[in-house]
Image (cartoon, rainbow, N blue to C red):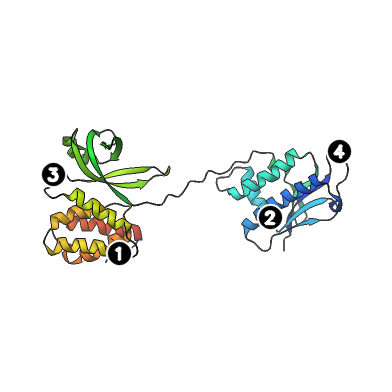
């Protein structure tokens, strides 16, 4: 069985006198503690009970046994490899600082494997860089309602601008939607838009629907409904949706239900709410007013769950 280990041996003080482990100065003790602490955190990150770290008598020697993975990770850090891990970068930087700045004499900084001894001091000559880790932003579902003056529409990447309470909001849309919305320029509009947090934690909006040309006040009704629905917990939001759609379907208001269903036709919509919609709509899914939008919701569920709905 192959035996391998990393050894870091400090044998002399800055003045050239010998270091003895059982008679260390306070400064030397602090350096040794920092070395052991840095490597202890690395060993902890490895989560391998076979890796052992310890001190040896005589000169101040830190030894890590069964250290092949640590050696490989050290090389990744030194090379600024894309798959380096920041736990190694941070703690090996501490070791690097001690080696470069302490003025103590290091007799050996090596990796030993069987009968081969590999100097690893060159690996500490390079600048270590923390890996920039992209934050994983979970889709945050939010539908917002805007009431204000529409003062811009179009662009190479179509969007509209609406001013509400003296605050300008940019809302992305399709070319077709921009064309329809253009006739409302410089007029007060009532619209809804899906909100999603981007990688900079900034809310980006995507146009959902406009309510200016409807006899019924969908804007106020939907705004109140979604505010309530988002405040509910457990299965209550699903029951809330079920009751709303049942009132539409039982009264034959399929065109009205279509406006309501549009609020959920987005990739960031909660899959449980989408399932609740599909369940209550099962008996009317082929109604000509909502058939296509129910299919859209079905596709969203399949995309989210990676399963085909039979």
Residue 310 in the image: state x and y as whole percent. Answer: 26, 66
The residue tagged 2 is: 40
The secondary element bearing badge 3 is classed as: loop
In this image, 76 relative to 156: left or right? Answer: right
Density class for disc 1 (Cα within 10 Å; few <14, some 14-19, many ≥20) is: few
User: Which one is closest to the eye, mark 1 or mark 4?
Assistant: 1
Residue under circle 4?
A: 15
Question: Which residue does the image show at 30% across and 64% down from the upper left?
Answer: 236
Q: Residue 121: where, in percent of width, then height?
A: 73, 43
Q: Image point 88% across, 42% down: which residue?
A: 17
Q: Nearer the viewer, residue 234 or 63?
A: 234
In contact (CB < 8 Å): disc 2 and disc 1: no
Instruction: Find residue 216 and name its label.
Output: none
132 left or right of 56 in image: left
Judge left or right: residue 256 versus residue 266: left
Task: Between label 3 and label 1, give the one nearer the viewer.
Answer: 1
- Per the model, the C-alpha gap separating discs 2 and 1 is 49 Å
Local crowd size for mark 4, using a 10 Å CA cut-off: few (<14), some (14–19), many (≥20)? few
Number of other residues with Cα within 10 Å of mark 2, as a class: few under 14, some 14 to 19, many 20 or more: some
Q: Quadrant of residue 245?
A: bottom left
Circle 3 packing at 10 Å, graded few (<14), some (14-19), many (20+), is few
Q: What's the distance in space between the residues labelled 1 and 4, CA to CA? A: 75 Å
**Residue lying at 84% horizontally and 55% vertically, measured from the top left:** 57
Q: What residue is pinned by disc 1? A: 236
Question: Can the viewer see residue 194?
Answer: yes
Q: Which mark is residue 213?
A: 3
User: Which one is earlier in the sequence, the residue at label 3 or at label 2?
Assistant: 2
Q: Earlier in the sequence, mark 1 or mark 4?
A: 4
N-term mark: 2 or 4 = 4
Residue 262 in percent (x, y) is at: 22, 52
Q: Earlier in the sequence, mark 3 or mark 1?
A: 3
Q: Secondary structure at mark 2?
A: helix
């Amino acid at each position: 069985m192959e035996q391998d280990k990393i050894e870091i041996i400090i044998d002399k003080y800055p003045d050239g006198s010998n270091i003895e482990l059982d008679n260390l100065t306070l400064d030397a003790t602090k350096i040794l503690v920092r070395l052991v602490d840095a490597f202890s955190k690395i060993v902890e990150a490895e989560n391998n009970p076979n890796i052992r770290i310890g001190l040896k008598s005589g000169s101040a020697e830190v030894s890590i046994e069964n250290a092949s993975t640590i050696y490989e990770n050290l090389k990744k850090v030194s090379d600024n490899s894309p798959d380096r891990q920041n736990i190694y970068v941070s703690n090996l930087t501490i070791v690097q600082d001690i080696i470069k700045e302490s003025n103590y004499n290091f007799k050996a900084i090596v990796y030993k494997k069987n009968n081969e001894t590999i100097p690893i001091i060159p690996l500490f000559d390079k600048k270590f860089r923390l890996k920039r880790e992209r934050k994983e932003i979970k889709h945050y579902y939010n539908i917002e309602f805007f009431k204000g003056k529409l003062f811009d529409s179009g662009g190479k990447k179509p969007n509209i601008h609406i001013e509400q309470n003296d605050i300008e909001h940019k809302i992305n849309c399709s070319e077709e939607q921009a064309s329809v919305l253009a006739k409302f320029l410089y007029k007060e509009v009532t619209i809804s838009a899906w909100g999603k947090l981007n990688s900079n934690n900034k809310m980006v909006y995507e146009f959902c629907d406009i309510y200016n040309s409807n006899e019924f006040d969908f804007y106020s009704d939907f705004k109140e409904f979604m505010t309530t629905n988002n405040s509910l917990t457990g299965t209550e939001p699903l029951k809330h949706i079920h009751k709303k759609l049942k009132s539409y379907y039982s009264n034959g208001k399929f065109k009205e239900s279509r406006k309501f269903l549009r609020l959920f036709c987005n990739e960031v919509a909660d899959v449980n709410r989408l399932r609740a919609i599909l369940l209550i709509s099962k008996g009317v899914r082929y109604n000509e007013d909502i058939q296509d939008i129910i299919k859209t919701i079905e596709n969203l569920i399949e995309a989210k769950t990676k399963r085909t709905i039979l």
